[in-house]
Structure formats: structure tokens, C-alpha cells
Amino acid sequence: MERGSHHPAYATLAGFALIGAGLCLARYAYTPLIPALIDAGWVDKAGAGYLGGFNCLGYILGCVGALQLPRRVSIRRLLRVSVFLVPAGLVMCAWDLGFAWLALGRAVSGFGGAVLVIHTPAVALAHVPDAWKKVSNGVVFSGAGSAIALVSLLLPLFLVYGVMAGWLFQSGLGLGVVAVAWVLTGSAPDTPNRDRAVERALESDRRLPLALLGSAYVLAAVGVTPHMLFLSDYLHRDLGVSLSASMHFFALVGAGSLFGAATSGLLARGLGTSFALLFNYALGVSAVAMVLLTHSLSVASVSAFCIGFFLMQCVALTSMKTTEIIGLSRHPKWWGILTLGFGLGLALGAYGFSGLLSLGLEYIDTFRIAQGILLLALALFACSGLRRTYDAA
């Protein structure tokens, strides 16, 4: 039965799969493929970065679509189309028909991924008791880390047969998500929301905290770009790590993402969401500093784990904090706006850092810039006064 309530365990599992598709398969599973793409002559270093930028462009358009399209089509239909767009874009990229074709495929996946990231939390958590929402939210977002780790560990086995096989492997995982989560998507609202007057305006005392939270979130997106886009190729090309080993290194990002997202709910319950976020931003700054201080591969391993922990815990905790500020009923709209800002930050990072690489800068220079950006995000969050609590919205 598609309509009505689902068991909290199933809703959490299906949300886990959808976020894995939206954040990993549609976005970050591309990173361990980059060294192979460059070695096979599909793209150069800057071109690989620009493909990441087109993925971000699709993600931004998906954010806008996720916010605007529910006025014309139901969220159920939007989710069900988007869950197919992710593997469809990956299949497109399996054929090297030129840069424009690859860019289109990355954009298609990005669009679908954004819709899944914006609407999945509210749809999944609607089936979870209030006492377990934070924990469930953390498990849902750990889907991204699990998918990153799985792709990074298994991808070398498929790349033995060529880059096409790597893309097809990822698209197959996307179809697996469709099978797992299809029933949950059927519980999403099935009628368009054409009444713009239903939702009341955001209260003035909530606007500034939400704006500061979102600003730090955008800066975090820019700051993680060198790790999340260039780490595998930096290790392979600049530090001499083998192709397969560079992919396995990115699995540490996935392991960190999994652990960070899965523990976010527990950390939020123990420390409070704002203190957990403050700790997490400090960890992100430290993760980038490790790359700058030494070329040790063991330290790079710790850095990869920590940046994954930081990124997915930042996403999960920011989603939780958004709910605390504005309430679950208004979460899809405002979480969509913050996700749009995050996508803009990712696009700025991808295009900006790729442009700098095309001008002759090295990978290590992008990490230096990222360090400064994350320090600014940490300072902004520390001064934001987000430790206050709010009445139910």
C-alpha cells in the first residue's frame, strides 16, 4: 500500500537510499572517477572541474524546481521523476560524445539529486515519531556516506573494463534506489500546492538566525570543494598514489560521511544542535589544515575522513537546525532555499577553483583558499547567536 503511514524503519531506510542517490550518486560519486576520466583522455584537469560545475548548475536548477514545481505538479510525481533522473544522467555519461554531452548528463543527475535532497527529509520523517526524528534524520543523511564508501571501494573493479563500466555501475546503483524507495515516494503529497497563502510569513525573530545559518552553509559548500572534487586526482597526480588507491582514499570520505551523518542526531541530542554545529565547523577547518601542513598519506587519510564527517554532519545538523527555527511544516520550503544556497556555493567552488587551475594554480593552492573560507564560516557561525531556542513554529 503506497498511501498512508509506513513503518518508521522502512521510512528511514528509504530516506537513507534517496539521500544516497541525491548526494552521492548524483554528485560526489563523480570524484573517484576523475583520475580515470583524465587518464582516458575524456577531459583534462580543468575540464573535470567544469563538469563538476555543470553538475552544480543542474543541482541549482533542481533546487529551484523543487521549490516552484510543487505549485503545478505534486511532490509525489516530482520525487518519482527525479529518482529516475539520477541514473539517467549517469547512463548518459557512459558514452564519451563530447564535453557538452557529458555536461548535460551531469546536469541531469544534479537536477534530480537536488529534488531528492530537498523533499526526502520531510517525506521520510513524517512517518517517524517525534522522539526519534533527530536520530532518524541522521540515519537518513548517512545514506550519502554509505554510498560514497561503497562506490569508492567497488569502482576500481569496474574500471578494469573501462570508464563506461564505471558509469554504468553507478547508474545500476541508482536503479537499486528506485526499487528500495518507490513505495515511500508514494506517500508524498499527491496534489499540487497552488495556494500560496496557506503558509504564513516567516517571523522577524527567525529571519536573521536563518540567514546566518544559511550564509555559513554556503561558505561550507565552497570550502569543501577541493576535497570533494579534486582529492582523488590530487593524490594520484601530485602525490603519486596509484589510480585504484586514490579511489580507495575517497572511500575514507564516505566512511567519514557515514559516521558523521549517523552520529549527528545523537550529538544534537547530547550537546544541542548549535553546539554540535560549532564543533563540526571547527573540525572542517582542521581537516583542510591537515592537507596543508604535510604531504603524509596517513595524515591525508585522516583529513579525508574528517572532511566527510564534517560535510554530511553539517548537512544533517543544518537541516535539523532549520527545523528548530521554522518548524517541520515549513521545512521543505526553507530547507530548499538553504539547499539552493549550498548548490550555489558548490557551483562557485567548482567553477572558481577550476578557473584557477586553468590559470596555472596547483591543487594545493585550492586547499589554501578553502582554509580561509572555512575559517570565515566558523567565525560567522560562532558569532551568529544560534544557541537560542524557539517556540514551535
Image (cartoon, rainbow, N blue to C red):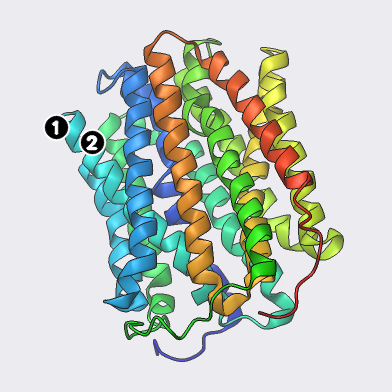
Report the disc number at residue 25: none
The residue drawn where x is 60% and y is 80% is 8
The residue drawn where x is 29% and y is 75% is 77
Which residue is label 2 attached to?
Answer: 102
Q: What SS does tag 1 mark?
A: loop
Percent x, y for residue 393?
Answer: 66, 79
Which residue is label 1 attached to?
Answer: 97
* Outermost right residue: 270
Splitting the image into 4 quarters, where does residue 367 fall? top right
Q: In this view, does 80 lie to the left or right of 35?
A: left
Type of the residue with mark 2: Leu
Within-10-Å neighbours for mark 1: few <14, some 14–19, many 20+: few
Splitting the image into 4 quarters, where does residue 176 fall? bottom left
Q: What SS does tag 2 mark?
A: helix
Residue 72 in view of the camera:
yes
Give the vertical position of 269 relative to 242 (above or below): below
Type of the residue with mark 1: Leu
Residue 14 in view of the camera:
no
Percent x, y for residue 15?
Answer: 51, 67
Q: Where the N terminus falls, by quadrant? A: bottom left
In 3D space, how far apart are the residues under numbered discs 1 and 2 (Cα atoms)?
A: 7 Å
Question: Answer yes or no: do the residues labelled 1 and 2 have beta carbons within 8 Å?
Answer: yes
